[in-house]
Image (spheres, coloured by chain):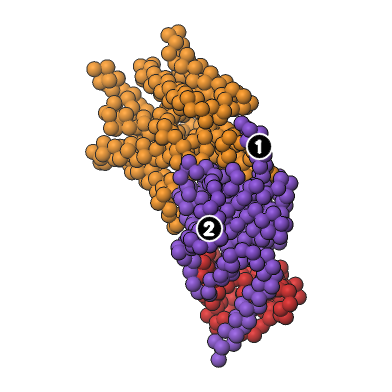
Chain colours: A purple, B red, C orange
Amino acid sequence: MTDQVNLDRRQFLGKASVAIAGIVIAPGMMLYDFAHARPEGEAASAAIRWGMLIDTTQCESGCEECVTACNKENGLPAAKSPTDVQWIRKVDLKQISTGRQISLPMMCQHCAEPPCVDVCPTKASFKRADGIVLVDKHRCIGCRYCMMACPYKARSFVHEPVLDHDTDMPRGKGTVESCNLCVHRVDKGEQPACVEACAKSGHRAILFGDLNNPNSEISLRLRNVASTQLRADLGLNPGISFVGL
Amino acid sequence: MNLLRAIILLSILSMFYGTVSAVSMPKLDIGLGGQCVDDPKYMRQNHMHMLKHQRDETVRQGIRGGKFSLSECVNCHASKKDSNVLGTSEHFCQGCHEYAAVKIDCFECHSSKRKILAGVVK
Amino acid sequence: MEKIFSQSETRQFYLIVALGLLIAGTGLAAAHFMEEHGHVVTGMSNQIVWGMPHVFAIFMIVAASGVLNIAAIGSVFGKAVYKARAPLAGMLSIALLAGGLFVLMLDLGRPDRIIVAATNFNPTSVFAWNLPLYSGLFTLVALYMWTLLEQRMNGWIKPVGLAVFTWRIILTTGTGLIFAFLVARQAYGSALLPPMFIVMSFGWGLAVFHVVQSTMYSWNNKIQDPLVLQRMKNLLGIFVLATLFLVAIYHGTNLYFAKQVLFEHFILLNGGIYPNLFWGGYVVLGSILPLLLIFHPSLGKIRCVVAASMLVILGAFALLYVFIIGGQAFPLSIFPGYEANSSFGDGQIATYTPSLPEFLLGLGGISIAFLITTIGVRVLNSLLPHDTLNQLKQEAE
């Protein structure tokens, strides 16, 4: 009897959350591969590898939609000082030899061979089976070794007490964090907030999908358009690739 | 020597202090009330173990929707007045933890406030 | 033979210990302040993630392992003069390691989670290896001190001494590997770093030992034997030269790689405080001047040796500052061939101003080492090296 009541309430809450999330997110999802929600109780699988393809030719300098969306989604304050946390940032580049200018968003590259995972003393920095690299805040001791090891400066240290915690994105002072590909959304079958915001803004510079699925839109694009990984010479095999770099 | 005896005697006597005021358990605002995921006595003794075990499954393996979820606990147990489990000695988590003198680490990172979903009647 | 202390000596001792406790207490207060408010109260940022506390801590840890060299030369290589100094070296090693770990652990973002670090072990992480390595060194050195001070255990000095020596080489290799494994940064990621750290440990450990030994001698109104001093100061000179050599190779090789040139120019020429500290602090004050003081024929007295040792220590701090902080200040090369600009410091030289809490924490660690040494020397009277004429005759043969 008790179990039935628990199950009912749990199911109701679960369904209500998914329904509302679906209604809110559906419009932005129309044009892209729908990442299906993983059923409850099922672990992330290595059959999938999440990745992104960023088209720098579509990215506009001065546009910060992805950054704003990430901050809103994860409860991050707007970054003003070097001690502020930044999970994603816009970088303006100018090629030294030609003078060509590009703009692109920069976040954790979710490497297949992440140096941050190798150096973490507690295995707090880890790679999930489906390729998402994240920090297990329960284990992070705040030693910042991963920040020293990351070639992309992806990680931030929380320098101040966190006020106004976000229920879906727990984070606290004294631990290290970085872009986690909006793992809480991906697990529900949604896209990362930055991808959605970029699509909404009309630029559509960020494509998200399953790199292991040869028929996913991202895999098709990667096969047909020339793309590069940042610092490919390091052999880390990042999950993020760039077009036009 | 007498001083030593006095100290030992006081120490032993102080152990019985708690039993004199037999039911001096904290008065808690249990939030929404109703049925918890398990028996209250069991939960009092084991909620930390359940959460610690399941959090690894959720974070490291990506298993969602388990029986124990901190945000679900908070959703239910947060006070109806300010939607928080922390704040005063009557708030759900803080009250008991103050009584038992056990520091809560969870809310360094996790939200202690109920998540209000638009359109869902609580 | 129990040494009896005069009343004024006892009073002095308690005064010194009180001072040490005060400074250590300030260090603890600084750490609490940092933990309470977060690292925003320090000069560290998302660009310079390891600051002043790491400079202090790494110096102490490297010196802790280096100081055991003196003991090793005695116990493993059988030199009598060094044998007499082994207990003091052991004591100093424990003291310095404790001080270094004090600073390192309190600088963590979550120092309350040390237990987590001890119970979740990542075999690919040098930091994780440091835990058994450092605690192992404590245990081994304590064991070693026992073999030295307990007459019945004297037969075990050589094997335990060998174990200590081997363990400390592994430990210092580990310290070097912390940086050697970082492929991301142009300052690190070099296989030269572990040997460099080992050689640095020889020099820094000996320098600290000189300073402590001379202080002990002067407080006990004894004069150091010039023959002993001669041998030990020459050794320091050799280590300073060896370190200079490896540092030169490290920078020289880097300068040969076109992709490293900008970084080397930053450290050696136009980086502001970093070239100043490197050339002025490490090369001139920390290497050339001590070498002069040590090897010049008209110098080489006890005062010069202590001065040389102190300069070497100063040079060590300068070198570590340039290495650790300069290495972080130079921007990562994420987009080779491009000039980068962002809100997160891409393409920009990062600035760092050490804050008071960081200094206090570092000094707190030094104070802990000082306290352990002072109290240890007081309690264990046999730590003051007694050089007999027989020993010196043995050495001359």
The numbered dot on residue A220 is 2
Q: Residue furthest front?
A: A224
Residue A158 in the image: above or below residue A95: below
According to the picture, the residue beneath numbered tag 1 turns out to be A100
Query: The residue marked by circle 2 belongs to what chain?
Result: A
Helix, strand or loop at mark 1: loop
Residue C77 in the image: above or below residue A124: above
Helix, strand or loop at mark 2: helix
How many C-alpha atoms fall within 10 Å of the one at disc 1: few (<14), some, or many (≥20)?
few
- Same chain, labels 1 and 2: yes
Q: Is residue C363 visible?
A: no
Q: Quadrant of residue A35?
A: bottom right
Q: Which residue occupies 49% across, 17% down?
A: C288
Horizontal arrangement in the rendering, residue A232 relative to residue C397 (left or right)? right
Query: The residue marked by circle 1 belongs to what chain?
Result: A
Q: Which residue occupies 70% across, 48% down?
A: A60
The three-letter amino acid code for the residue at tag 2 is: Leu
Task: Report x, y in % for residue A129.
Answer: 47, 61
Q: Quadrant of residue C349?
A: top right
Q: Residue C280 or A196: which is nearer the viewer?
A: A196
- Image quadrant holding the N terminus of chain A, namely bottom right
